[in-house]
Image: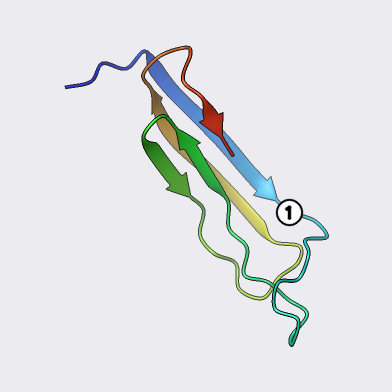
Amino acid sequence: MEQYIGLLKVGVIKGTNLVATDFLSSATDPYVVVSLGNQTVKTRTVKKNLNPEWNDELTLAVPSPNTELKV
C-alpha cells in the first residue's frame, strides 16, 4: 500500500473564451483533467459552451513532494 504525505485540493472555477472544436456549431464540450503521479481526475463535461463554469473541487492524494502535477 502506497503512503501519502497529504491531500491536494484543486479548485476549478471557469474557463473563458475557449476555442471551438466543433466548427459546425461553433462550440465545444470542455472539461478539465488533473493528474498527479498515477492518479487522474476530471471535471464534469459542460456541453456546447465556450465559457464554461464548473465550480468544482478535485482532490488528489500526494505521494511525494517531488510528484509532477499535470493540468
Looking at the picture, how far across and down is residue 44, in whole percent? 51, 60
Tell which residue pokes out farthest to the right in this image.
17
Q: Secondary structure at mark 1?
A: loop
Q: Residue at x 48, y 38 (%)?
A: 35
**Type of amino acid at the residue the image marks with label 1:** Gly
> How many labels, in total?
1
Residue 69 screen position, x and y as percent: 53, 29
In which quadrant of the rendered image does the C terminus lie? top right
| 17 relative to 13, above or below | below
Residue drawn at point x = 51 percent, y = 53 percent: 43
Badge 1 crowding class, 10 Å Cα cut-off, few under 14, some 14 to 19, many 20 or more, is: some
- Position of 66 with respect to 25 (left or right) is left
Is 5 above or below relative to 53? above
Identify the residue at image location x=48%, y=50%.
Answer: 42
**Vertical order, 62 against 21 (above or below):** above
* Residue linked to disc 1: 15
Give x and y (percent) for residue 61. Answer: 37, 26
Q: Residue at 62% x, 70% y: name it.
A: 29
Q: Tell me how the rendering is colored.
A: rainbow
